[in-house]
Image (spheres, rainbow, N blue to C red):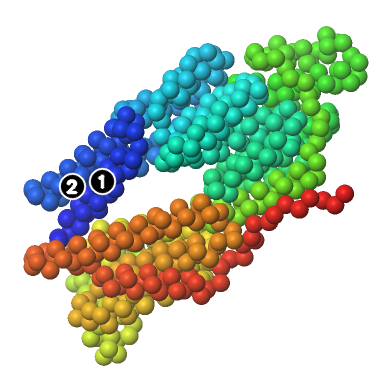
Amino acid sequence: MNQIQLWLAPLLIGSIFGVTACLRVPLRWSAGYLAQHLLIALTAICGFIMEPAWLFALVGWLLFFTFNVGRRILVSSIGSHLAAMRTTIALKQAGLLRFLAWGAPGRFWIDLVNMLDFYSKNQNAQAEALADKWYEFDLPPQMRDTLTAYSLTGIVMNRDWPLVLETFERAVAAHEKDLQEKRKGARYPAQAAISAMRAYCELGRFDKAIECLERAEIASNFHQRDSLDTIFVSLFSLCGATQDLENLLKSLPPPPGGIPEYGRHFWKGRCAATNGDVETALQEYDRCLSLLPKNDENWRDRVIYQRNRVETSRRRRDGLPPELDEAAACLDRLADVTAPMLPLITARASDDLLRRARIVRDHAMTVARIMDAGKRGPAVRRLVAVLAVIFAFGLTGQVSDNRWINEIYFTIFSGGLLQGDLVLKGEWWRVLTFIFLHANLSHLFMNLFGLVWLGKHVENVYGSARFLIIFFGSGILSGVAQMLLTPHEPAVGASGAVMGVFGASAAATLRLKDILPAKVRTAELKWMAGLAIMQIVFDQIVNLASSMGHEEAVRIAAWAHAGGILAGFVLGYLLPMQPFEPKKEFTPAAS
């Protein structure tokens, strides 16, 4: 197998997996995705049997990134704009989805954006018609949950709390039906449970709110820190837990990475209002209004509505006629809210309920710290930079006309690659230096991709120093395995070290049984097992094809991969992990 075919093979294998996944859901939904996977597979096959093979490889990977990565980025961007209620921008982006998500999925996302746009304009009938259209469609369970979550977002905007609870119960009933019918992909509507939690808080039914929080299995379903912040900031605010809210806001990253400053003042105002502190609530709402971006009418109406509730409560408390409060009357004229104003509820959640909420929060934050690599991983970033710089220098040495540079490159490469007979003669440094050398750009790219994908997670679990021990320890031991079992085959590359990081990730997942939810551990171990099997098969296919005597044949250091993953797994079991607190159980306070 030559270098170009080495790029075509993953495309073909990935497309086969994609086709298999499409056939597991209703074809009416997945037909567009199925056509995309078949197109990529056909492109890869043409590259194996036709020339120029490099052109088919280029087109195939462009299609892969466009349909998969591009679609995910666009959907994520649309979700971010919808969360901030920037529906105009979301509508423009949704129009592009028809080119990336063919058939039903593209129409689905466009209708979701239109649905929220209708809700934001109080055109509820049109919004509900779009939701009903897709509820009648045979959606996969995951996408049905997405529909419910976005529908509830619109209903929450209109503060129709009874309808939120009705929609939640309907989603739970659909989930129970999926379980009875043993439908694949059945999943509890966690997003809907979060919306129901919010509704119960708004109605002052804190016991039911905490019950929804616990049923949502936050630690299993929400691994991004910003999602958790949004959930618990609103919960502690509406429960009147002032100290919990303050502590959480202090731990958030500063804007623009975290909740914006005006959002922080809004939730402080809601918390003060829940506790009956009218003056503080009004101050926080006024501060929020002063910080709001221009033309953000959705947030503006939201704040004015809550401020009016507090003003109305104060007027009633002081026995003042509403028409005497000129400030409140002015705000009433400015607000564009059609829903009836709900009375202000000044009731705080009990200490036992708040303790239950903290247990859920602490466990969810711990799991997110493990699973969400996010912006962490300084050791990974430095390794990527070092490997890239060394390859760039090597590439310069290959193409440069400067004799001095050429000689340095040749000395480094020939003196650093792994060659068993030379190591046995005393050139022991080769079992380390070969990790930093790569044969070509595709070799480097694949290793850097694996390092970034897996490395940050392992660094989160073990810390930077022990991550480096795993990386270099696995890399060295992978070289030893390659040297002993195929002593006459030279080898270069960090793939053995990357496979060691993969093995350590599997070991950590097994060891974290008291922290990671069973659903998360099972899902992680399944995809790891599938990836390991695919890597073994891929290595053997490549080496088998290369043994047929092709003049440009590329061989993979299969024993280095095997040795690396085994070494990483052992190191992952032996090295201490970061201190993660096990999940707590709720113990009611003594009466």
Q: Nearer the viewer, mark 2 or mark 1?
A: 1
Where does the image place residue 500, in percent across and percent down from the top left?
A: 39, 69
The residue pinned by badge 1 equals 15
Figure check: 375 above or below 86 = below
At label 1, counting other C-alpha atoms closer than 10 Å, the crowd grade (few under 14, some 14-19, many 20 or more) is many
Q: Is residue 394 visible?
A: no
Helix, strand or loop at label 1? It is helix
Q: Residue sitting at 72 percent across and 24 percent down?
A: 306
Q: Residue sitting at 25 percent across and 47 percent down?
A: 16
Left or right: residue 468 compared with residue 255: left
Where does the image place residue 545, in percent across and percent down from the top left?
A: 14, 63
Q: Quadrant of the N terminus?
A: bottom left
- Which residue is farthest front? 180
Q: Total of numbered circles in the picture?
A: 2
Helix, strand or loop at label 2? It is helix
Where does the image place residue 50, in percent across and percent down from the top left?
A: 8, 48
Where does the image place residue 401, in percent across and percent down from the top left?
A: 17, 66
> Which sits in the foreground, 143 or 171?
171
The residue pinned by badge 2 equals 44
Left or right: residue 169 compared with residue 499: right
- Image quadrant of residue 339? top right
Q: Residue sitting at 24 percent across and 64 percent down?
A: 539
Left or right: residue 585 compared with residue 394: right
Disc 1 marks a residue whose amino acid type is Ser
Asked whether the residues under the numbered discs 2 and 1 touch, taking CB atoms below 8 Å apart as contact, a structural biologist would say: yes
- Which residue is farthest bottom? 425
